[in-house]
Amino acid sequence: MTPAVLALAALAAVHFPVSTTDRLAQASIDRGLLFYFAYDGGDAAGAFANAAARDPNLAMAYWGEALAGGPDLNTPMSEERFQQGQTAVGKAVALERYATVDERHYIDAMAQRYKGTWADWKDDDDGYRAAMNRLADAPAADDVATVLAAEALLENGGFVWTGSSPATPDSRQALALVTRVLARDPENLMANHLCIHLYDGAHDRTPALACAERLDAATLPPQGEHVAHMPSHYWIESGNYAAAVASSERAYRLFEQLQQVGDRNPDHDRYLIHDAYVGYSGAMMLGDYATARVWSARMDATYGTSFDALTALRFERFADAYALAQGSAPNDLAIRGLAALELGRKDEARAIAAQLRKITTAGDVVDIFFARAAELDGRYDEAVRWLEKAAATQRDTFADELIPLLPALEARGAFAMRRDAYADAVTAYGAALAAYPNDPRALAGLAAARASQGRSP
């Protein structure tokens, strides 16, 4: 084996034998499938194209290009991608005489996905899903067919759960297929990836714990950045914010390495916004201001706007928040107003509220500030309405691994504490903990509210 093949084999966690005698072509197939399982479709397509260049008669290389050009759970289908996939699978079909019987089953299923025109896409995709489900149900079905069938089912079935199982038949079948693969091969990359997605909407996410731990432990190339990020879903959703930050840190480091890969596909850069937010939101839940500032700087670079003032406010560094929030955007004004209130600058806070009302009355951070401004002037019922509006906005906007950076339910509890309404505070902090398990500020508030009631904290 050449050093290049050895390096590829050591790096890859996926092996999908195809009918080629070229070792580098086989290694490129493995890498392409690994990249696809990590939802780096652009680099997956490049790897499959490399395999085709090494072995022009390798039908499965073109099958891989069609797979990479299709949709995934994060990537919708487009007409341009459809055209590319249709061209690729056409080449695969033309080369079927060089393929094994099992390979032709894969190719024929993929051909169903692209058999018509773009206008026929939904029906064609239904045909692909049915064909992959038949492959997965075959007595000798391999794990690649099974996880690809599960993915296709989940794309159609969605993430919603009802009670103790997914809400749709397709998603229930997807869960059964993923469970089957994990029983045979607990380290299967795609099965662990889909496992975390499947349990994003579950009330009890405990079955995804092992999947998160395995992905955290997996050795991944830079193109595996997204799958390195996936454990942070579970950690955020279960309230282990330190673990969420650790998973996000690893993913971010892989993303930095990916930027140094000369022939990388830049389409993967779209994941940075999401992955940086998850790491930042996890850091904002912890008590380490230095870590939060590291992630704040990453958010600044990613979003093109400063999060420094919000970070300072979250950590009750009110003088810093006031000094940093000097912009004219609604959130900047709201943060400066909240900081001004904490610093005793009541008249300035009133002036900021008046200025802000001329611009907007929308946004959760703005609503939280309006609540404090109403409270300042004794308009307590109005303050409650603003806090309830902020909480409703956050409930509708944030789900699963996405959590607000300034939780309104915490603010509702703090408002009740300032009013000596301890039972109300217990309820509000309890709601915060139901939404964001182990939220340390809500836990501290709940302890204080219970102590004020004469109960054990």
Image (spheres, rainbow, N blue to C red):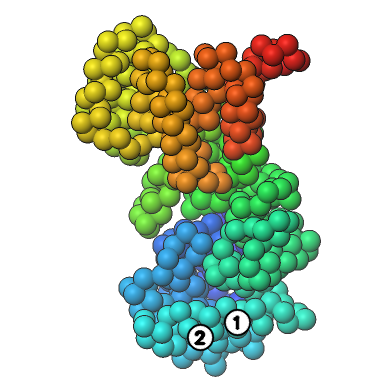
Q: Is residue 242 visible?
A: no
- Residue at point 64%, 14% (across, down): 448
Q: Is residue 304 left or right of residue 297?
A: left
Pointer 2: what residue? 112
Vertical side of 431 occupied by 84: above or below:
below
**Element at badge 1?**
helix
**Element at badge 2?**
helix
Whole-percent x, y for residue 4 in the image = 53, 58
Quarter-of-image position of residue 272: top left
Quadrant (top left/top right/bottom left/bottom right) for the C terminus: top right
Pick out the residue farthest to the top: 344
Vertical side of 99 occupied by 374: above or below:
above
Pointer 1: what residue? 130
- Residue at point 53%, 14% (across, down): 419
Which numbered disc flags the more N-terminal residue, 2 or 1? 2
Tell me the crowding category of disc 2: few under 14, some 14 to 19, or many 20 or more residues within 10 angstroms, Cα based.
many
Marks 2 and 1 in Cβ contact (< 8 Å): yes
Whole-percent x, y for residue 85 in the image = 41, 77
Quarter-of-image position of residue 343: top left
- Three-letter amino acid code at the position of disc 1: Ala
